[in-house]
Amino acid sequence: MPLPGITIRPADEDDNAAIKTLVETSFGSRYDPMERDRTLSLFPLEDSIVAVENGQIVGHVQSTTMTVTVPGERTVPVCGITGVCVAPTHRRRGILRAMYTEQHRRVEAAGLPLTMFTVSEGGIYGRFGYGPATWENAVGIDRKLAEFRSSAPDPGGVTLCAPSDIRAAAEAIYDRWRRLTPGAQTRPAASWDILFDAPQRSRGHDSDLFAMRHADGYVLYRFHSEGWTKTIDIVELRTVTTTAHAALWRTLLGLDLVQQVRGTLTDHDPLLYLLSDSRLVRTTARYDVLWLRLMDIPAALMARTYMNDLDVVVDVTDPFRNAGGRFALRVRDGKATCEPTGRAADLECGIDVLGSMYLGAHSARVFAAANRLRAKDSARLHALDAAFRVERDAALGWFF
């Protein structure tokens, strides 16, 4: 629906300075020219949408097409959205909805099965059909007290590296890792540039990068010092094998003069089970990272694989677009067929629930307990839950 006095249109070069001001104001951070150039190489200006009133930019959305791994080590093209903001002078006028209407019209026209983004405020995007699809747990580990179990592997094979010497190896390892990990994206050069040359504003008083590598993994970290107290902040740790995981964690927890190691773990990270006292891995925060929306339900559900056979009819409600409906989902030997049907529904849910379940991070059973998924009987619910399970925790590859 048109908004009085507001024009929704593609961005152009003349909008660059005004977009920068709006984004910096909305997210509370200044960006240097190099950062802006790198962002535009990741998310081209011509793919951005702006809301304009009397020549003033009061809203902004930018996007690009990414390749993302889904369960079953398959990859699909998706729309990745970022830089979503509305000027504080123009709140609650429907500007976000108007920009999102145009953004999602574009995605539908491109035939992409999924949209995804990282979210600053969790209470906004369910109304647009998005659900949180990955979780991270921020942890702090008392390095001086942490000991590995006598049965824990001690494979070795870790090398200390200068960051300038590890990039090529890290890129190759990351590519192996992302092919295995639901939610991980292919990574363009500009994202690597940002990782290895982070601006001072994003690292505060932390040191420059330090690095370790293994044939099947790597870790990038910084030292944070407060007086005589040193803490390691892990910037990125990617491992293809459990051997690399154990080796890198042993080396990190073997660094002298460090009191604490801080990082993030997925829900089923084996670190807790490697240590003799798992309480030393203290969770300090738990938060969603990646949010998903299914743009084309049959295409999205057929793009991934499944752990168990399944034969159900799902009635899906879409509060924002026209992707909902009643669908027959049949899985045999991991592969799905999905098509619209007139049969009676076995299960009912919102499209945001499917987005949360899609990468395997959320359980159908828990959504049913919250009455956000309704099943005809427990057998169908348990079958759905078993089918959507995954072998490897979902994780975002690189933040955007």
Image (tube, rainbow, N blue to C red):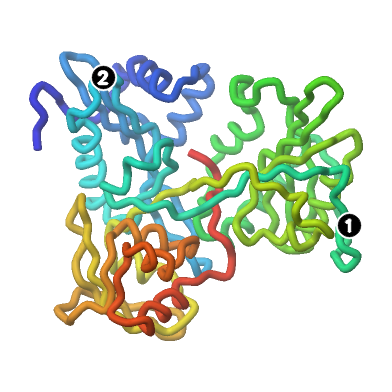
- Give the crowd class for mark 2: few <14, some 14-19, many >=20 residues within 10 Å: many
Residue 205, x across and y down, in percent: 70, 20
Depicted 286 relative to depicted 385: above or below: above
Q: Are marks 1 and 2 in contact (CB under 8 Å)?
A: no
| First-in-chain label (1 vs 2) | 2
Residue 283, x across and y down, in percent: 65, 47
Q: Residue at coordinates 36% horizontally, 15% vertically from top-left? A: 17
Q: Quadrant of the N terminus?
A: top left
The three-letter amino acid code for the residue at tag 1 is: Gly
Residue 358, x across and y down, in percent: 41, 63
- Residue 57: give its label: 2
The three-letter amino acid code for the residue at tag 2 is: Ile
Q: Quadrant of residue 284?
A: top right
- Residue 302: give its label: none
Residue 164 seen in this snapshot: no
Residue 34 seen in this snapshot: yes
Q: Nearer the viewer, residue 87 or 43?
A: 87
Q: Residue at coordinates 21% horizontally, 62% vertically from top-left? A: 324
Residue 296, x across and y down, in percent: 27, 61
- Residue 156: give its label: 1
Q: Secondary structure at mark 2?
A: strand
Q: Nearer the viewer, residue 272 or 152?
A: 272
- Give the crowd class for mark 1: few <14, some 14-19, many >=20 residues within 10 Å: some
Q: Secondary structure at mark 1?
A: loop
Is residue 338 shown left or right of residue 212?
left
Q: Residue at coordinates 40% horizontally, 37% vertically from top-left? A: 121
Is residue 77 shown left or right of residue 344?
right
Q: Nearer the viewer, residue 162 or 204?
A: 204
Q: Residue at coordinates 35% horizontally, 33% vertically from top-left? A: 84
Is residue 155 shown left or right of residue 6?
right
CA distance for labels 1 and 2: 55 Å
